[in-house]
Amino acid sequence: MDPLDIIKDYYRPGTLAFERLVRHGEQVAGKALATAARVAHLDPDVTFIQEAAMLHDIGMFMTDSPGIGCSGTHPYVMHGVLGRRLLDRRGLHRHGRVCERHIGVGISAEDVRRERLPLPVRDMMPETLEEEIICFADKFFSKNNGRPKEKPVARILQSLRYYGDDKCDRFTSWLEKFG
């Protein structure tokens, strides 16, 4: 399966949204594959990681995010559940789970209730090794402003702190696990 073929079904090459999605997916895939190599003893599925990392943000075109070329109607926080729906319809359920579970460091049902997020009230936390690796790698890169550089860990932790110490703790545990 070539993720670019799927991306091209929803994004027109040459558009800002296409360029941001593909570049970000490539950055996340590279970081995720390097991370997987460091924990090869845990036997991560690297083919799946590469595919799912490229597709994890596929639902963003349905969001109202003009800064990244998206003119949909949904809030950006919904891009994960929207992406899961798209990939589930294609029979790519495992890939769809990554879409839904990569937001932040995962979103709990309690987070949805407490923050009154426009999301289904259910736990959307990374559970598998591959989901954790992709979620971890995603934190290092932004789609905004075309930023090609990897974010430093201190900046990631600073942004997660806004959402609670438990989010920082989860990311810190991944730093320890993934080296």
Image (spheres, helix red, strand yellow):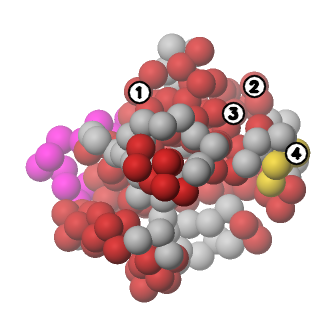
Which residues lie in the magenta part? Answer: 37-47
Q: Quadrant of the C terminus?
A: bottom left
From the image, tell me which residue sits under label 2. 9
- Tags 4 and 2 in contact by the CB under 8 Å rule? no
**Which of labels 1 and 3 is toward the front?**
1
Residue 175 showing in the rendered view? no
Regarding mark 2 in the picture, which secondary structure is present there?
helix
Q: Main secondary structure of the magenta part?
A: helix
Residue 42 lies in the magenta stretch: yes
Question: Residue 100 vs residue 68: left or right?
Answer: left
Kind of residue sitting beneath label 1 = Arg
Mark nearer the N terminus (4 vs 3): 3
Q: CA distance from mark 1 to mark 3?
A: 17 Å
Q: CA distance from mark 4 to mark 2?
A: 16 Å
Mark 1: give few (<14), some (14-19) or many (20+) Cα within 10 Å: some
Look at 54% across and 57% down and name the residue there.
115
Residue for badge 3: 7
Q: Nearer the viewer, mark 4 or mark 1?
A: 4
* Residue nearest the observer in this picture, 158 or 89: 158
- The answer to whether the residue labelled 1 contacts the one labelled 3, judged by CB atoms less than 8 Å apart, is no
Judge the density around disc 4: few (<14), some (14-19), many (≥20) Cα neighbours within 10 Å: some
The label number, if any, that marks residue 104 in the structure image: none
Tell me the quarter of the picture where residue 176 sits. bottom left
Label 4 sits on residue: 71
Kind of residue at badge 4: Ser
* Label 2 or label 1, whichever comes before in sequence order: 2
**In the image: residue 163, left or right of residue 26:** left
Q: Secondary structure at mark 4?
A: strand
Left or right: residue 134 versus residue 174 is right
74 vs 156, left or right, is right
> Label 1 belongs to which residue?
94
